[in-house]
Image: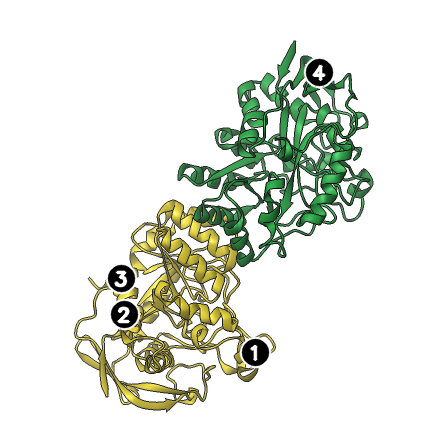
Chain colours: A green, B yellow
Amino acid sequence: MLLRLPGLIDPHVHLREPGSPHKEDFGSGTAAALAGGFTAVLAMPNTQPPLTDQASLALAQRAAQSKAYCDYALYLGAGVENVDSAIEQSHQVCGLKMYLDQTYGSLRLDSLNVLYDHVSKWPHTKPIAAHAEGISLAAILLLAGLHSKPLHICHVSRKDEIILIRAAKEKGYPVTCEVTPHHLFLSEEDIPHIGANRSEVRPRLATKKDQQALWDNLEFIDCFATDHAPHTLEEKDSDNPPPGFPGLETALGLLLTAVKEKRLSLEDLMARMVTHPRRIFHLPEQPETEVQVDTGASWEVRAANFHSRCGWTPFEGMKLRGKVRQVTLRGNVVYKDSEVRASAGYGMDLMFAN
Amino acid sequence: MLLRLPGLIDPHVHLREPGSPHKEDFGSGTAAALAGGFTAVLAMPNTQPPLTDQASLALAQRAAQSKAYCDYALYLGAGVENVDSAIEQSHQVCGLKMYLDQTYGSLRLDSLNVLYDHVSKWPHTKPIAAHAEGISLAAILLLAGLHSKPLHICHVSRKDEIILIRAAKEKGYPVTCEVTPHHLFLSEEDIPHIGANRSEVRPRLATKKDQQALWDNLEFIDCFATDHAPHTLEEKDSDNPPPGFPGLETALGLLLTAVKEKRLSLEDLMARMVTHPRRIFHLPEQPETEVQVDTGASWEVRAANFHSRCGWTPFEGMKLRGKVRQVTLRGNVVYKDSEVRASAGYGMDLMFAN
């Protein structure tokens, strides 16, 4: 059966540009997005250099403008040095990204003073997206609440965290959140067959109990986000494996398989992959845009067939239901029969769409 | 001039019993309290063993009952193991103490899950007192706010922390706080003359800017608390100096000197050393209780004259105004002319006063 969906939105991808085009760039990353049914991706700022000022942001903007096949927007990174200047870039980005816990890159913030000032000075008009686990999550919720700033919690992975977000939502805190397919479909029990090195990801794969708590609290999860974080196989299999999984080309298949298994409704999926991310990040509608999915097709995950440059996936060999056949973006067929049909640079920066 | 004050209350002392009577015990510690003008002290649970269950609490209760010269109450410690049982001891203690940051002893909590459960299960009737610096402070404020539990922040020492508490108070969060004399009167600039080892204290001595912020925000500081944390000179001068200062016998002199210098009013002092701690910790009035202070007397701090067992002070040699001449507790003169007149065990546990 052919299912016609609106273009999906992924609010959390790492396209590795500027700095690490051997892992991914705006071309390969947005090709992977189209292959996965996404017509818009929001790209994270923990690049090299990190996107914390006009000069670094311009590097990413130029790369994206010349290479992107699908639409996109960029996050600004919150650093120690741009507390006062971040607001100057706020109209060009989809949000301010804060790293409160250990991850890949150099943007980690651990001082109350800096967090407080970033939250108080950032405008109300764009969300603050936070990598905040455990106690850090409670802290950033307080700061967002005190300053009435919209807060989006990235890749929630543990029971205590979704319970806390649920409690904060019930008390009226201005918070939304996202969960990744890998935290919904993998747990620490999968580490042996994925391999310890390749399983490195932040937040880490959690327990079965944590995983179940995410499914049990789906009502409080606003978005699905891949946290597409490509590293090459060589890097993952090295002595110091960087954390991160690719995710753009498996997310829809995993979630449609869950729909097939009745763990999720198609409406649940659409809300979390289209309407909620569009509302939270104030993204414009993409006119004449459609994804055609063959819901009857089953396929086996093979990283060798990916458009992503990283060459591996933790879901290798998994059998999934639902295959993207064709993507139309703003009136043009941009992806068909496993091939990108758009020209490089067709993708628009959605923050400059008007 | 002879000033007649109500008995002072110190909401934060370490009397080292059970476990370390060579540093202090309920006898020497409450003698030091009377010498400092305090007729009630609230004793912290990071003893050996820590006070986290009925058996350990009973050890401290028995020691206090047989030795204390002034009135007192005990805190229960929040540990990983007593999340479900803490409530059973709540009627016997003045509050639940949580350690969210590094300090002396083994009670540190660093899991969101455990913090969340402690805050949600502890009754509304007694405060939760927290050692919570920086990001931990923001986290515990959120949890107390979500569960509407009264929260008392111990020994606030830095500008960003008092600013955050001020913002939370202005938003109606159920929070009170205390500041120590050593953070009001010492800063990191005093470390060279005190000596690096002896200056070890948690929270650390802060910057002059932090110190000034405490004075500037006196309005938002509910209590003065000594955080009397005696260690012997031998321990402090060892290769691994434990953190902590004694404080009971210098607090009033330091603060009355500030009154003399018009940095503080006597009303400010009384509110923070009598009425506020009594209200926050639901302490009964101590009838027929009075402290006589010679406000004209100036004296030089000499640890050799202290009743505390630790034998040193970071304020050694400082010239202060205001000397405690006599203390009357519940109708009896318990301290006069530098000597304790009460018999051991005269002090009452204020949680069993009715």
Q: Chain of mark 3?
A: B
Q: Quadrant of residue A301?
A: top right
Percent position of residue A49, x then y? 73, 49
Residue B323 can be seen in this image: yes
**Which three-letter amino acid code belongs to the residue tagged 3?**
Arg
Quarter holding the C terminus of chain A?
Answer: top right
Q: Are marks 2 and 3 on the same chain?
A: yes
Label 4: few (<14), some or many (≥20) within 10 Å? some
Residue at the spot of label 4: A298
Q: Secondary structure at mark 2?
A: helix
Q: Nearer the viewer, mark 1 or mark 3?
A: 3
Q: Earlier in the sequence, mark 2 or mark 3?
A: 2
Q: Which mark is residue B274?
A: 2
Q: Chain of mark 2?
A: B
Q: Chain of mark 4?
A: A
For image coordinates 62% across by 40% down, the residue present is A93
Residue at the spot of label 1: B197
How far separated are the C-alphas under marks 4 and 1? Answer: 68 Å
Percent position of residue A251, x then y? 66, 27
Q: Earlier in the sequence, mark 1 or mark 3?
A: 1
Percent position of residue B22, x then y? 45, 78
Identify whether A156 is placed above or below B33. above
Q: Secondary structure at mark 3?
A: helix
Q: Earlier in the sequence, mark 1 or mark 2?
A: 1
Label 2: few (<14), some or many (≥20) within 10 Å? many
B179 vs A288, nearest the viewer: A288
Residue at the spot of label 3: B279
B352 vs B300, nearest the viewer: B300
Q: Chain of mark 1?
A: B
Query: Do the CB atoms of the residues marked 1 and 3 lie less than 8 Å apart?
Result: no
